[in-house]
Amino acid sequence: MSTKALKTELHSKNAHRDRYDFPTLIIASPSIGSFVNENKYGDLSIDFSDPKAVKELNRALLNHYYSIKIWDIPAGYLCPPIPGRVDYLHYLQDLILESNQGKEIYGKNISVLDIGTGANCIYPLLGSSIFGWKFTATDVDEKALEAARANLTSNPKFALQIELRHQSQTSKIFNDIITQSDYFDLTLCNPPFHTSIEAAAEGSQRKIKNLSGKASKNTTLNFGGQSNELWCQGGELGFIRKMIKESQNFKHQVFWFTSLVSKKENLKSIYQALTGVGVSNYKIIEMAQGNKQSRFVAWTFLNSNQKETWSKMRWAK
C-alpha cells in the first residue's frame, strides 16, 4: 500500500489535500462501496472515467465533509469535481479577507452571486456549508434550476441561505438579474469553455482517453454537461468579455466580480477588456488541481474610499 501524499497544489485550507479516504467515505455513503477497488499501485480508488462512480464520490464527499446529506443531478448534467470547487471558494475567502485588512467576516455578512449554478448548485451549497455565506444562484436552464431547487429542498439547513433566479435571456449575464436593491460582495462563475458543440465533443473524447487510456467515439463524459454548460458563442473568452462589459452597469453594487479562466492564452484579451471598461483594480489568482493549472480573474470598480465605505457598511456588522 503506498503512503498518502499531500496535494500541495490545493489551497492550504482545502479539506481535500490528502488522498481520498475511501473506508471513511464508504461509512458516510455506503453506495460508493461498489465502485471502490484497488488500483495498480495498491491504493483504493474508483474509475474516474465512469460517470456513475464520480457521482457517487461527490455524494460521499458532500455528505462526509459538508453535511450535504442528499444531492443529485439529472442524467447528462455537469458533475463538478469537488476539490477544485472548494479551492475557488477558499481563494475567494482570501480575497475578501485581504479587502478587509485581514479581519474575519462571518456568515451572512457576505453575499455572493453565482452565475450559471447548474443543476448541481455546488458553489452555493459548499459556500453556505463552509463559510455560511448567502447566495443568489442563476441559470438560463429552467430544468437545471428545478434540479438545483430539489437539492436545496433536500438540504433545508442551507436552503434559507440560497435564492435561485432564472435568467430568461441567454444573451445576458448580470442584466435582468441584479436588481436596484442588490449588493454583492462577490460574483463567481465557471464559464462555458468551448466555442461549439463540435469542440465540446472533441474535448470530451480527449478527457475520456486521458482518464481511461482508451480512445472512444462516445462523447459521454465522466462529469457530463449540457450544451449551455460546455459551450457558447465565442467560448470562454467571449463569455468573460460579455461579463466584463455588463459589469459596468453594476460597478457600485458589486465589490469583486470574478470568473474562472481555464485558458491562460485568454488572459491578454481579458486584461484589454478590463482596461477598456476602466476598472480600478484587477488581479489573477493562480490555482491548480493535480496536473491541471487554473486561475480566476477578479476585478472591481470601487476606489479606495468606496472600498472603505463598503467595508464599514457591510462587513463591520
Image (cartoon, rainbow, N blue to C red):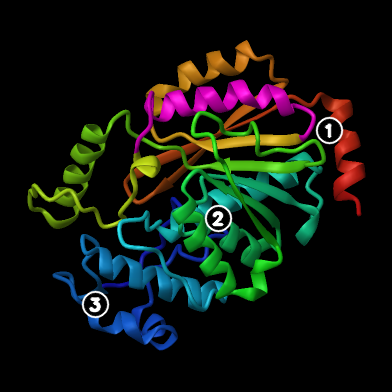
Q: Which residue is mark 1?
A: 307
Q: For mark 3, does the 10 Å Cα neighbourhood hold few (<14), some (14 to 19), or many (20 or more) residues? A: some
Looking at the image, residue 28 sits to the left or right of residue 204; the answer is right
Name the image quarter holding the N terminus: bottom left
* Residue segment shown in magenta: 231-253
- The answer to whether the residue labelled 2 contacts the one labelled 1, judged by CB atoms less than 8 Å apart, is no
Q: Residue at x 24, y 33 (%)?
A: 199
Residue 43 percent location from the top left of the image: 24, 74
Q: Is residue 268 above or below residue 158?
A: above
Dot placed on the residue nearer the N-terminal end, 3 or 2:
3
At a point 21% along the width and 33% down the height, the residue shown is 198
Say left or right for 142 vs 197: right
Label 3: element kind: helix
Q: Is residue 287 left or right of residue 92?
A: left
**Which quadrant would residue 311 be assigned to in this image?**
top right
Amino acid at circle 3: Phe
Q: Earlier in the sequence, mark 3 or mark 1?
A: 3
Decide: marks 3, 2 in contact (CB < 8 A)?
no
Quarter residue 78 falls in: bottom left
Q: Residues within 10 Å of mark 1 (few under 14, many from 20)?
A: some
At x 78%, y 42%, the residue is 182
Instruction: Give left or right: position of 152 versus 163.
Output: left
Q: How many marks?
A: 3
- In this figure, which residue is indicated by the disc labeled 2? 123
Crowding at label 2, few (<14), some or many (≥20) Cα neighbours within 10 Å?
A: many
